[in-house]
Amino acid sequence: MAIDGRSLVVVEVKAHSAGNVSGPARPVLAVNRDKQWRLRRLAEAWLQSRASRLSFEEVRFDVVGITIGTTGAVVAREHLENAF
């Protein structure tokens, strides 16, 4: 969870190794419809448990993808704002 102005941002971070042949071509593509549904339900429960203390104009779902090279360094990153 993060805050961006008056927005609550639910951030899902996915990582994979460079040259990985299994899974999606880019880490952000691992957030499929099922994962999106689970994230929405999680955010809803989190907000309900804090409704009396928090107020946001919107809830946004971002996805961040990280690709790790063979040395362990980040070789690529991708940030999809309002991904779904």
Image (cartoon, rainbow, N blue to C red):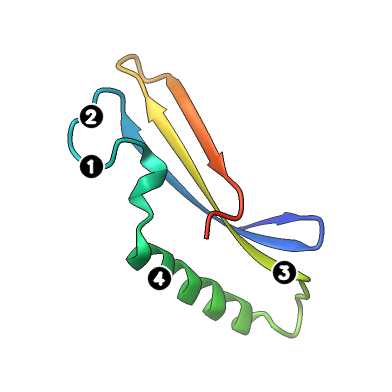
- Residue, x 35% and y 58% (percent of image)? 32
The span from disc 1 to disc 3 (Cα, nearest Å) is 32 Å
The span from disc 3 to disc 4 (Cα, nearest Å) is 18 Å
N-terminal-most mark, 2 or 4: 2
Q: Which amino acid type corresponds to the residue marked 2 in the rendered image? A: Asn
Q: For mark 1, what is the residue?
A: 23
- Residue, x 75% and y 75% (percent of image)? 54
The span from disc 3 to disc 2 (Cα, nearest Å) is 36 Å
x and y, in percent, of residue 31 in the image: 38, 54
The span from disc 1 to disc 4 (Cα, nearest Å) is 19 Å
Question: Looking at the image, do the residues carrying marks 2 and 4 touch, with CB atoms under 8 Å apart?
Answer: no
Quarter occupied by the N terminus:
bottom right
Secondary structure under the numbered disc 1 in the rendered image: loop
Q: For mark 2, what is the residue?
A: 20
Mark number displayed over residue 8: none
Q: How many labels sit on residues? A: 4
Q: Which amino acid type corresponds to the residue marked 1 in the rendered image? A: Gly
Count neighbours of disc 3 (C-alpha within 10 A) and say few if under 14, some if 14 to 19, many if 20 or more: few
36 relative to 62, above or below: below
The span from disc 2 to disc 1 (Cα, nearest Å) is 8 Å
Q: Which amino acid type corresponds to the residue marked 4 in the rendered image? A: Arg
N-terminal-most mark, 1 or 3: 1
Count neighbours of disc 1 (C-alpha within 10 A) and say few if under 14, some if 14 to 19, many if 20 or more: few
- Residue, x 37% and y 40% (percent of image)? 27
Q: For mark 3, what is the residue?
A: 58
